[in-house]
Amino acid sequence: MVKFISKNILTGLITLLPVVLTLYLLYWILISIETALGGLLRGLLPDGWYQPGMGLLAACGVAFLVGLLMHAYVVQSLFARGEQLLYRMPVIKSVYRAIRDFFDYFSPETRKEFEQVVAVRLGESEMELIGFVTQARQERLPPGLRQAGYVLVYLPLSYMIGGYAVLMPSSAVRPLDMSLEEAMRFTLTAGVTGIKPNVGTGRSKGGHKSDAGG
């Protein structure tokens, strides 16, 4: 009886905790933004004009405006120069670079580089690893790594934050019909979660041409 109750409690926690933690994190981010920008708006607007939620609307407006301005070459140049200053400051450069790399993962440009999920064959063995083609264009690789017919593949580690970037021949890379999120979840949990059946990735094997495979 005790084992039955404990098992169900554990199942309930495993089911609820991811949902609760995700919602709490989202709630914390939204409240933090509203508190910060809301306080600023209270000081700028006349009494009685501020309404709850205006801080979030202001944040969306600022993000949209910055994204719009970043299409201009002048703004891109100024931003790049500002970043170079940050990269020269001790301590700050390490913190900023880590945060920058994390958020770059979510940018549309970066995600395009990781959309190709592949299976990598190791040598003459039949062993394969799941990876992501991060660079298939030779001109974007360091001069010492430029080899015809090779691509750069990122191999994530299970249950760890990190992985390896390896240069592989295209013949050792086989495209997989998996989305980025599905492949990351599968590899980071060492396949424990498995692949949910009847979940489409939006691509078909025949309709996705691989840059890695030529």
Image: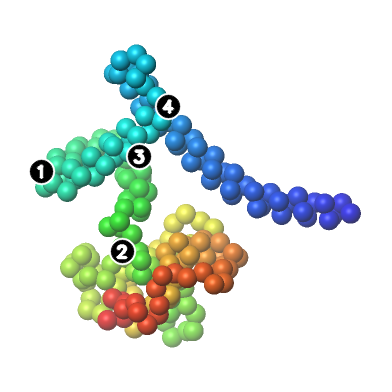
Q: Quadrant of residue 189?
A: bottom right
Spatial distance from mark 2 to mark 3, Cα to Cα? 24 Å
Say above or below: 126 vs 55: below
Disc 3 element: helix
Q: Which residue ends up furthest to the front in the rendered image? A: 48
Q: Is residue 123 above or below residue 180?
A: below
Q: Which residue is disc 2 drawn over?
A: 113
Q: Which mark is residue 74?
A: 1
| Residue depicted at 16% across the width and 45% down the height | 76
Specify the amino acid type for callout 4. Pro
Q: Are marks 3 and 4 in contact (CB under 8 Å)?
A: no
Choose the circle earlier in sequence order: 1 or 2. 1
Q: Earlier in the sequence, mark 1 or mark 3?
A: 1
Q: Which residue is mark 4?
A: 52
Q: Residues within 10 Å of mark 1 (few under 14, many from 20)?
A: few
Horizontally, residue 182 falls left or right of residue 153, namely right
Q: Earlier in the sequence, mark 4 or mark 1?
A: 4
Residue type at mark 3?
Val
- Counting other residues with Cα less than 10 Å from the Cα at mark 4, is it few (<14), some (14-19), or many (20 or more)? few
The quarter of the picture where the C terminus appears is: bottom left
